[in-house]
Amino acid sequence: MRIGELARRTGVSRRSLRYYEQHGLLHARRGGNDWRDYDEPAVDRVRAIAELLASGLTLDGVKDLVPCLEDHDPERCEDTELPARTYRARLAEVDDRLAALQDTRERLTRKLTAL
């Protein structure tokens, strides 16, 4: 499938798809006209990449995880605990940010009450 169809089916922009490819997250065959041609599994791969990025993982974090997510094949993933460790670390970061935001909220509420 061409890049436009992959973008339509995944809801990910063409620009983002090119970015994923540039960083080794996505691969396309090139036809004689040099157009990108993606296979059907690219749809699930792009959706997984977009979900991981939306979850706040870095591009490098996604690169590390992609082999562990594809085809649910443990052979492809050298460290089968990597996804769980990565998600726990990201969750801890989110919890820290939530705690900081809660503290900020409480400070603002006290200042507003003092007015």
Image (cartoon, rainbow, N blue to C red):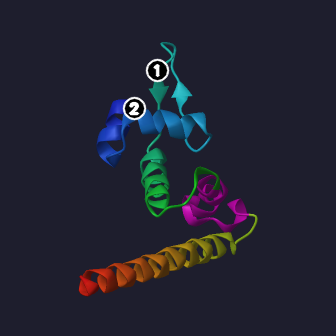
Instruction: Judge the density around disc 1: few (<14), some (14-19), many (≥20) Cα neighbours within 10 Å.
Output: few
Q: Quadrant of the C terminus?
A: bottom left
Spot occupied by residue 98 in the image (x, y as percentages of width and height): 45, 78
Q: Left of 15 or right of it: where is 60? A: right
Please state which amino acid type lies under the numbered disc 2. Ile
Q: Give the range drawn in magenta.
A: 61-77
Q: Residue furthest right?
A: 78
The residue that label 2 is drawn on is 3
Q: Which of 45 and 53 is in front in this view?
A: 53
Residue 47 painted magenta: no
Which is more N-terminal, label 1 or label 2? Answer: 2
Q: Name which residue lies at 47% across and 45% down.
A: 42
**Residue at the image point whose x is 29% and y is 40% from the top:** 8
Find out whether the residues at labels 2 and 1 contact each other: C-beta distance under 8 Å. yes
Q: Can residue 13 be seen in this view?
A: yes
Q: Which amino acid does label 1 sit on?
A: Trp
Tell me which residue sits at (63%, 63%) in the image. Answer: 68
